[in-house]
Image (spheres, rainbow, N blue to C red):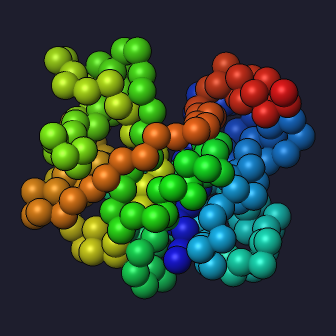
C-alpha cells in the first residue's frame, strides 16, 4: 500500500513560523509534526508520496529518499488549488489502494491501523458543533451517504479528519471548483459514493490538527504527556 501525504500548504495561520519552514515541518516538542504520523504508519504502507509545494525542498532535504524502511517520492502540486488538486498531483505514482493523510496533522496509530483494513473508508471523530466542520452522513448500514461542508442542519456529529483509504479511481474524477475557488477532495469522494462505491468509517483514537498556534500548543501538551 502507498500513502499520499499532502504537504504543500502555505500555513498562513502559523506565521511567522511558516515564514521559515513549511507546515509539515513546524516543530512540536522539537520534532517536525509530520514525523509523528510517519512513525505511526501501518506496516502495510511500503511507499510514501509527499505532495509538496511551499518550501517543499526542505521536506525533501530532511527525509530524502527513504524513511523507516519505506521509499519516499515527491511530487510538486504547483498552484495551491485545493486538496482535490493536490491529491490528483500524485496520480502518476499511485498504483492502487492508498492511504491519504494531511501532513500537518497528527493521527493515532490504532485509528490508522483500523482504517487500512478497508478498501474505502474515512477516519472520523465526533464533534460538539458539527455545523462548523465537514460532516459525514451515514445510512442505516453505517456506510457514508455523503460529505457536507459546514451544513446548516447537520444530520450527523461525525467530522472527517483528513485521513482516508481509497482506490486510485478517485484520481480520475473531475469536479468543479468549490465556492472557495478550490478543488475539494470531499467532492471527489461524493462522486464515488453517487456511483455506488461504499465507504465505511473508523473513529480516530487520536487526531491533532496543526493549523493554528493554539492547535500546535495543544498538540505539544497531548504528545508530551
The residue most toward the front is: 141
In the rendered image, residue 91, in percent from the top left (x then y), is placed at 40, 77
In the rendered image, residue 97, in percent from the top left (x then y), is placed at 41, 75
In the rendered image, residue 11, in percent from the top left (x then y), is placed at 60, 38
State the residue at coordinates (61%, 50%): 110
Residue nearer the viewer, 85 or 32: 32
Q: Is residue 80 visible?
A: no
Q: Is residue 136 above or below residue 42?
A: above
State the residue at coordinates (58%, 39%): 205
Q: Is 30 on the left or on the right of 205, as rendered?
A: right
Residue nearer the viewer, 103 or 193: 193
Q: Quadrant of the C terminus?
A: top right
Q: Is residue 208 above or below residue 67?
A: above
Q: Is 216 on the left or on the right of 89, as rendered?
A: right
The residue most toward the right is: 30
Q: Is residue 163 above or below residue 2?
A: above
Q: Is 216 on the left or on the right of 197, as rendered?
A: right
Q: Is residue 103 visible?
A: yes
Q: Is residue 54 above or below residue 50?
A: above
Asked where in the image residue 65 lies, by quadrant, the reply is: bottom right
Asked where in the image residue 195 lies, by quadrant, the reply is: bottom left
In the rendered image, residue 124, in percent from the top left (x then y), is placed at 42, 39
Q: Is 158 on the left or on the right of 54, as rendered?
A: left
State the residue at coordinates (21%, 59%): 198
State the residue at coordinates (23%, 49%): 143
Amino acid at each position: 500500500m502507498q500513502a499520499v501525504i499532502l504537504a504543500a500548504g502555505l500555513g498562513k495561520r502559523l506565521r511567522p513560523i511558516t515564514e521559515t519552514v513549511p507546515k509539515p515541518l513546524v516543530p512540536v516538542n522539537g520534532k517536525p509534526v509530520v514525523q509523528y504520523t510517519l512513525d505511526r504508519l501501518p506496516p502495510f504502507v511500503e511507499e510514501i508520496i509527499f505532495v509538496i509545494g511551499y518550501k517543499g525542498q526542505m521536506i525533501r532535504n530532511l527525509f530524502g529518499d527513504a524513511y523507516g524502511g519505506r521509499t519516499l517520492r515527491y511530487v510538486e502540486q504547483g498552484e495551491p488549488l485545493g486538496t482535490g488538486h493536490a491529491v490528483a498531483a500524485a496520480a502518476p505514482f499511485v498504483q492502487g489502494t492508498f492511504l491519504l493523510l494531511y501532513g500537518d496533522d497528527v493521527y493515532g496509530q490504532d485509528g490508522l491501523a483500523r482504517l487500512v483494513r478497508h478498501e474505502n473508508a474515512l477516519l472520523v471523530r465526533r464533534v460538539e458543533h458539527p455545523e462548523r466542520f465537514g460532516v459525514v452522513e451515514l445510512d442505516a448500514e453505517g456506510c457514508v451517504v455523503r460529505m457536507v461542508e459546514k451544513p446548516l442542519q447537520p444530520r450527523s456529529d461525525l467530522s472527517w479528519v483528513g485521513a482516508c483509504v481509497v482506490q486510485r479511481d478517485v484520481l480520475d474524477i473531475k469536479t468543479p471548483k468549490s465556492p472557495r475557488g478550490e478543488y475539494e477532495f470531499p467532492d471527489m469522494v461524493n462522486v464515488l459514493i453517487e456511483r455506488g462505491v461504499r465507504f465505511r468509517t473508523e473513529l480516530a483514537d487520536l487526531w491533532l490538527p496543526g493549523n493554528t498556534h493554539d492547535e500546535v500548543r495543544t498538540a505539544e501538551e497531548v504528545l508530551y504527556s
